[in-house]
C-alpha cells in the first residue's frame, strides 16, 4: 500500500529532453536548475582543522618523484620509497610531531594530517614513513626520556637512523602481552639481554627490518631479579654503518606482499643480544643499576595499556589515510561514470552515461556519502588526538576516550575503503583492472590496513567492552531486578541515551531544518534516534545476556562471552556508525549556521552547499538504516511500512544527488598529479566525442551503411 | 521471549574439559563423538561428473613448472605462462573440446573441468589457456566451418598458432552489438577490409595481443552492398612468423594489471587490413563472392545472440574456477584457524585456537557452506553445457536455459570468491597478506573475473529479463485485472511456483528428513519455500511495476525500467541463490538415498556424511535468509520471532559444524602441491608446539620468572 502511494508520485528531479534518448535525469546542478555546492568551501571543510598542512603536503607530492610506479619490481620499489622519505625530510615533513628543541614543530595534529595525504602519492611511502616517524620514532619519544631523545631523535628525524618497530611476533600479533621475546637484566654488567627463545617469538612483519633499519625499538618481557614485569620497549641497534647485521641478530626478508611492496618488511631474531641498561625506554617503568624495578603506574595491566596507548597515532592516521584513499577511488570512478557511455536506451542512437543508470548510482553514491562522513569524523578524531598529545587535554579519561574513538573509527574506515575501492574498480570495468588507473593498486596497498595497527575485529571488541562498561556504570548500585526493568523496553534507552556513552562523540549541535528531508519519519532527528537507539539496545541486550558471567567459572564465562562475540562486535560497529553520522551532521549544521547568517547577503552557493550536503548526510543515515533494516524490524523500531520506505527514499536521494556527484568529488580537491588515472583525466570523454563526431560525419556524408533491420522493414 | 526459550537450552555440541581453559567446544568429529564425513566420498561428490579429468589435471599441476611465482616481474611471468601452456599441450590438455579428426576428444564437459583446475597452479595460465582454446579456438570452431577448422584448428590445439580474441573495444565492452570496427566487403578483390575508424574502436584488453598472438578472431560490423549486417567474426593474421606486426596492424601493451600479469593483454587497431572473403567465420552468416549476404537465421538480433551464445563456455568455466579458488582460500584459512592460537581465555595458560572463537566461525563457516553449494551448482551447469555442446540436448530452449543459468551462476560465484578470499586473508592476519600464503595473489588474479566474460551486473540483468519474460508467459491471454489479482498475495506465487522458471534448475528430489533440522519453521522444505517465494514475489512485483512501460514512450519506458534496475538485479541474484540451494539439496538427498540403502549394512560414515552436509546445506540456506531478512519481514514472509531465530540457528549450526570444519576442507582433496601456503602446511602447528614445549620445560626447570602480578598478590 505504501508502495502504491509512493509510486504514483513522479521523482523529484526535473526532466530534460536528452539529445538521443537517454534516461532524462539531469547530470549537473546547472541542468537541474538547482543551487550547487560551493566546491572550494567544501574542500576547506573536508581538509579540516589542519587544511594548510594538507595543502602543503599535496603540493609537495605533485612532484613525480613521489609517485608510485605500478609494476616496479620489489627491490627497486623499496629503494625508491627510502629515497622518497629522504625527500620528505628535505621538505620538512618529518619533524612536525617532534619537540622544538630537536627542530620539530610539536604539532601532532598537523603531523598526522600531512602524513595521511602521502597515500595519494604512494601508500608504501606513507606507511614506511609511519614506521620510521610514527612507530620507531614515537616509541623513542613517547616511551623514552630526555637521554633517549638527545641520543636518537635527531637521527630519527633526518633519517640518518632508520629504524624498525619490533612489537609483533610470528606467534603473537593482537595479543601483545603474550609475546615471547625476553629482556633479562644482568646487574653484573648493567645490561639487558634481549633474546628470542623460540621460533614463534621471532619479530615479524617489521618495516625497515629486511634492509634499511639500523636499530629497532624492541618490545620484550622485562625480567629482573627473577620477576617478569611485563612488556617494555628497548632500543636495540641491529645493523652497523655498512648495513651488516650486528652479532646475535638475524634478519629474514618477508618477501613479496599483497601490497606496500615499497616497504622492506622482515623478521628479526635475537640471540642473547646485550644492550646497556639505559636502552630501556623508561618513561613508564625503569630498572635501577642494582636491578630494582620501579614504575609510577603500580598496576601491571594499566602500565601495559598506557604504553600501548602512547602509540595510538598509527590507528588515527590509518583512519585518515583510508578515507583519503577511498575519496581518490570515488573521484576516479564517478568522473569516469560521468563520461563513459554504454548501451543506448532503445529510444535513439546516443548511449547512456553510466552514472545515469539507477544501479550505478546505487553502487557509487551511498559510498560517497560514507566517505564524506568519514572525513568529518576523522577531523574530530584528529582534534581529540591533538588535544591529548599536545597536553592540552591530557587526562586519563580523555586518553581512554581517544583510544576508544580510534578503535571504533579505524575499522570502519579501513573496511569501507576496501569496499569502496573494489566497487569503484568494478564500476570501471576492465579499465578499472588496469594498474595505470590506480584502483587495483589502492586496493592492494590498503588491504593490510584492516588487520595491522590492531586487527579490526579485535579493535571493535575493545570498543564493545567499553560500551558494556559504560553501560554498567549507569547502574552502579542498582539491583538485578532494576537492571532487568531498565534493559527491557525503552526506559533503558532513555536513561542510557543521556549518559557517558554519547560523550565519546560530539554532541549534535543542530539537527537542521526538517524541510530538506521530505520523507515522513526519516528526517535527521529520526535517523539519529534510530542509530543511537540501536547502539543502546544492542548494548543493553548484551549486558543482560552476559550478566550471568560473574557467577560462572572462568571457563563457562569465557564460553558465554564467546557465544556473543559477534554481537559485541556488531554493537561496536553500530557505535562507530553513529559517531560518523553525528560528525557529518555537525558539519552540515555548521554550514547551515553560516548559511543562515549570510542569507541576508544572499549566499546562494552556501545555501546550496548546506542543502546538498544535507541530502548526502541523509543518504548516509538512511543507508545505515537500510543495512540494518532487519534489526530495526525485529526490534520493533520500524514498521514494515516505514522500512519499505527506506529503500525508496534512498533511490530518490540518489537521483537527487546525481547532478551534484561531480561537484562532490571535485570538492575533494585533487589535482591531476594526485589522480593520475588516465580514465579520469578526460581521455574517455575525448574518445567518446571523437566516435560521435565520426558517426555524425558519416551520416552527413550519405555514405553510411543502412542497417539490415531497416532494410527488412521496407 | 523467543530469546529466553532458546537461551535456556544448552548448545547441542558436547563439552569437553580443555587442557588450559579454552572455550570448550569440540574441535574434531572424534572429540564431538559424532559420525564424521567420509572425506573421500565427499571429494568424489565435489569433483563431480568429470572427476577423472579433474584428478588428471590436479596430478599434472603438481609439477612446480606450473606454479605461480609471486612477485615475478611481468615480462618473465608472461613467458612463463606461455611455456606452461606448451606443457599443457604436451600433457594432452588442450585438445579435449575439439573434434576427433583434429586429434581431439570432443568432450566439452571434461575440457572445462580440466581447465578449471588450473586456477590452483596459476590463474594466469588458466585464463591464457582460456583465451587460446576457449575463446580464440572456440570462435574458429563454433563460428567457423570445416575449411576454417582444417586450416587453423591443428595450430590452435598445438599452440603453433597462438591467437587473440578481439571482441571488446575501448569504447564498448558489455554492449558488443555497438562495436565500431568495420569489415567492409570488396567484391572487386573478394576481400573484407577490416578497419578501426576511431580510437574508441580499438580492440582492448585482449590476451595474446601484446606479444604472443599470431592471429586474432576479430568481431566487426559486416558491411556489404551498403548494408550493415551486424557483428560477425573474422580470422585475421596479425603477426608474421618472426613476431613482427603485419602491415596495417598496430598493437599496444596494456601493461601492468591488478592481477593475471602472466597474460600479455593489449590493444589491436586495424588500418584498412584486407583478408580473404573466406576468412569470415561463416557458420551463422556468409557473404557470396558477389557480395550477397545470406544466413539461416533471418532475425539479425537472434543471429547475433546465437553467435555470442556459442561462446558461453567462458562464463561456465569461470563459475567453476572461481569456486575452486574460493575452496583453496578456505582450505588455507580454516587449516590455519585450527592451529593458530591467540589470547588465553582468562582461565589458564593455554591460548584459544582461532576457530574456537564464535566470530571466527561466523566469518568462515557460512562461506564454506556457500562454496559447497557452488560446487554442486557448477556441476549441474557443466552437465547442461556438455549436453548442449555435445549435441545431445542441443535445442534452442536448452541453449537459452544454459545461457541464463551461466549468467545467473557466474556472477554469484565470482563475487563470492572475492568476498571469501578477502575474508580468509583477513582471518589469517598479517600472514594472510604475505604473498607466499597465496590469498592476496588469488584475490588479485580473480578480481577481474567479476567484470570480464560479461560484467556481473549486466549478466544479472539478462537473468532478470528472462525471469520477467517467463513470468509474462504464465499470463498470456490473461487480462490486466487478472494479472493484478495474481500479482498480489500468494496466488501468483503458487501458480508461478509450478511453472517454467523452476525448470532452469534441477527439481529438488527429496528435501530430506526433518529430524536433522531441529529449529521449528526453518527446516529444508521451509528454506526452499522462503527462497523460491522470494524470487517469485520479486519477479511479480517487478512485472507489476513495469507493466505501464508498454504504454509509455521509449524515453519514459527506459526511465521507468532504470528506476527499477537495482531491483531487477536483486531478483536475478535471488534466482541464482535458489538454484545453488537446490543443487546443494539434491546433492545431500543423493547421499541420503545411498545412505538409506546402505543402512542395513551399517555405513556409519555415509550417514555421517549426509548428516554433516545436511547441516552445511542448512547453514547455506539460513545464511541466505539472514542476508535478506529485511525483505522477508517487510513482505510478511517471516514473523519477527522466526526472523530472530534465524541468526541464533546459524550460530548453533556454526558450533555444530565446527568439529567437522577440517574434514570439510580436507574433502576438497587438495595436495600440498596445490596448497603451497606455508601457514597451511603445518609450520604454524610446529611453532606453537615448540613454544609450548619451551614454556613447559622452563616451568619444570624452576627457573621461570614469576609474574609481577603474582608477586603483588603475596
Image (cartoon, coloured by chain):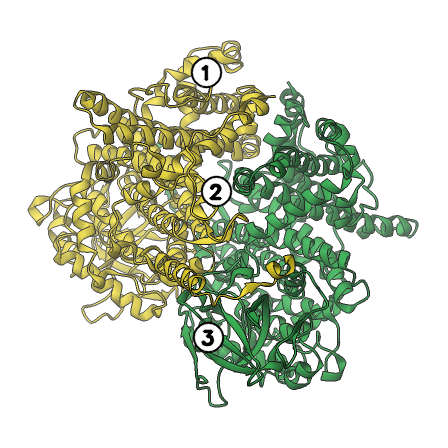
Chain colours: A green, B yellow
Residue B411 appears in which quarter of the rendering? top left
User: Taking the image as drawn, is residue B547 in sight?
Assistant: yes
User: Where is mark 2, residue-wise?
Assistant: B23
x and y percentages locating residue B168 in the rendered image: 37, 52
Q: Is residue A263 above or below residue A588?
A: below
Q: Is residue B333 above or below residue B626?
A: below
x and y percentages locating residue B688 in the rendered image: 39, 58
- Seen as rendered, the residue at the extreme right is A600
**Residue at 18% across / 23% down in the picture?**
B598
Label 3: few (<14), some (14–19) or many (≥20) C-alpha neighbours in 10 Å: many
Q: Is residue A544 left or right of residue B307?
A: right
Which numbered disc, 1 or 3, marks the residue closer to the eye?
3
Tag shown at residue A77: 3
Q: Is residue B231 above or below residue A305?
A: above
User: Taking the image as drawn, is residue B204 in sight?
Assistant: no
**Label 3 – label 2 distance at C-alpha:** 45 Å
Q: Is residue A100 left or right of residue B623?
A: right
Write down the chain letter for disc 3.
A
User: Where is mark 1, residue-wise?
Assistant: B493
Label 1: few (<14), some (14–19) or many (≥20) C-alpha neighbours in 10 Å: many
Which numbered disc, 2 or 1, marks the residue closer to the eye?
2
Instruction: Please determine if labels 2 and 1 lie on a single subunit.
Output: yes
Write down the chain letter for disc 2.
B
Amino acid at each position: 500500500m505504501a508502495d502504491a502511494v509512493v509510486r504514483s508520485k513522479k521523482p523529484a528531479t526535473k526532466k530534460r529532453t536528452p539529445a538521443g534518448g537517454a534516461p532524462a535525469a539531469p547530470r549537473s546542478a546547472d541542468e537541474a536548475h538547482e543551487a550547487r555546492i560551493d566546491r572550494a568551501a567544501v574542500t576547506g571543510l573536508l581538509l579540516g582543522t589542519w587544511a594548510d598542512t594538507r595543502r602543503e603536503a599535496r603540493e609537495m607530492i605533485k612532484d613525480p618523484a613521489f609517485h608510485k610506479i605500478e609494476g616496479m619490481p620489489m627491490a627497486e620499489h623499496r629503494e625508491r620509497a627510502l629515497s622518497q622519505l629522504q625527500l620528505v625530510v628535505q621538505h620538512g615533513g618529518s619533524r612536525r610531531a617532534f619537540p622544538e628543541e630537536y627542530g620539530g614543530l610539536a604539532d601532532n595534529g598537523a603531523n598526522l594530517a600531512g602524513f595521511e595525504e602521502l597515500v595519494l602519492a604512494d601508500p608504501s611511502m606513507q606507511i614506511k614513513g609511519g614506521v620510521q616517524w610514527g612507530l620507531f620514532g614515537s616509541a623513542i619519544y613517547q616511551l623514552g626520556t630526555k637521554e633517549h631523545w638527545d641520543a636518537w631523535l635527531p637521527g630519527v628525524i633526518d633519517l640518518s637512523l632508520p629504524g624498525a618497530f619490533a612489537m609483533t611476533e610470528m606467534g603473537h600479533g593482537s595479543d601483545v602481552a603474550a609475546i615471547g621475546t625476553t629482556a633479562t637484566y644482568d646487574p653484573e654488567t648493567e645490561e639487558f639481554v634481549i633474546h628470542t627463545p623460540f621460533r614463534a617469538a621471532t619479530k615479524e612483519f617489521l618495516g625497515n627490518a629486511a634492509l634499511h633499519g639500523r636499530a629497532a625499538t624492541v618490545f620484550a618481557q622485562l625480567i629482573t631479579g627473577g620477576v617478569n614485569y611485563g612488556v617494555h620497549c628497548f632500543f636495540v641497534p641491529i645493523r652497523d654503518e655498512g648495513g651488516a647485521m650486528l652479532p646475535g641478530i638475524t634478519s629474514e626478508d618477508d618477501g613479496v606482499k599483497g601490497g606496500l611492496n615499497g616497504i622492506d618488511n622482515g623478521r628479526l631474531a635475537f640471540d642473547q643480544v646485550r644492550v646497556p641498561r639505559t636502552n630501556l625506554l623508561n618513561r613508564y617503568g625503569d630498572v635501577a643499576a642494582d636491578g630494582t624495578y620501579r614504575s609510577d603506574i603500580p598496576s601491571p595491566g594499566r602500565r601495559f595499556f598506557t604504553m600501548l596507548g602512547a602509540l595510538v597515532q598509527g590507528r588515527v592516521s590509518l583512519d585518515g589515510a583510508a578515507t583519503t584513499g577511498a575519496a581518490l577511488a570515488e573521484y576516479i570512478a564517478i568522473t569516469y561514470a560521468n563520461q563513459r557511455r554504454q548501451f543506448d536506451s532503445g529510444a535513439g542512437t546516443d548511449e547512456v552515461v553510466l552514472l545515469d543508470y539507477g544501479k550505478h548510482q546505487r553502487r557509487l553514491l551511498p559510498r560517497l556519502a560514507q566517505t564524506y562522513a568519514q572525513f568529518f569524523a576523522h577531523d574530530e578524531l584528529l582534534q581529540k588526538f591533538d588535544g591529548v598529545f599536545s597536553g592540552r587535554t591530557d587526562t586519563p579519561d580523555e586518553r581512554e576516550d581517544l583510544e576508544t574513538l580510534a578503535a571504533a573509527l579505524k575499522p570502519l574506515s579501513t573496511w569501507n575503503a576496501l569496499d569502496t575501492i573494489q566497487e569503484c574498480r568494478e564500476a570501471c570495468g576492465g579499465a578499472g583492472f588496469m594498474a595505470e588507473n590506480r584502483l587495483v593498486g589502492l586496493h592492494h596497498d590498503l588491504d593490510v590496513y584492516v588487520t595491522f595497527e590492531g586487527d579490526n575485529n579485535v579493535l571493535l571488541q575493545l570498543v564493545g567492552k567499553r560500551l558494556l562498561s559504560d553501560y554498567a556504570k549507569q547502574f552502579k548500585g542498582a539491583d538485578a531486578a532494576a537492571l532487568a526493568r531498565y534493559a527491557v523496553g525503552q526506559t533503558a534507552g532513555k536513561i542510557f541515551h543521556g549518559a557517558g556513552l554519547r560523550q565519546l562523540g560530539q554532541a549534535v549541535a543542530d539537527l537542521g531544518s526538517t524541510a530538506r528531508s521530505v520523507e515522513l519519519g526519516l528526517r535527521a532527528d529520526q535517523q539519529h534516534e534510530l542509530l543511537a537507539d540501536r547502539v543502546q539496545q544492542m548494548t543493553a541486550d548484551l549486558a543482560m545476556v552476559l550478566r550471568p558471567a560473574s557467577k560462572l567459572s572462568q571457563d563457562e564465562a569465557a564460553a558465554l562471552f564467546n557465544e556473543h562475540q559477534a554481537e559485541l562486535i556488531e554493537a561496536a560497529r553500530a557505535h562507530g556508525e553513529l559517531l560518523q553520522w553525528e560528525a557529518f551532521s555537525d558539519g552540515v549544521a555548521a554550514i547551515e549556521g553560516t548559511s543562515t547568517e549570510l542569507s541576508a547577503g544572499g549566499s546562494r552557493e552556501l545555501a546550496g552547499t548546506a542543502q546538498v550536503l544535507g541530502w548526502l548526510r541523509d543518504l548516509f543515515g538512511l543507508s545505515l538504516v537500510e543495512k540494518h533494516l532487519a534489526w530495526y524490524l525485529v526490534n520493533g523500531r520500524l514498521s514494515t511500512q516505514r522500512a519499505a520506505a527506506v529503500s525508496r527514499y534512498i533511490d530518490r536521494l540518489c537521483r537527487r544527488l546525481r547532478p551534484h556527484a561531480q561537484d562532490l568529488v571535485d570538492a575533494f580537491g585533487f589535482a591531476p598529479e594526485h589522480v593520475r588515472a588516465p580514465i579520469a583525466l578526460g581521455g574517455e570523454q575525448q574518445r567518446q566525442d571523437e566516435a560521435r563526431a565520426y558517426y555524425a560525419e558519416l551520416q552527413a556524408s550519405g555514405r553510411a551503411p543502412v542497417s539490415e533491420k531497416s532494410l527488412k522493414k521496407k
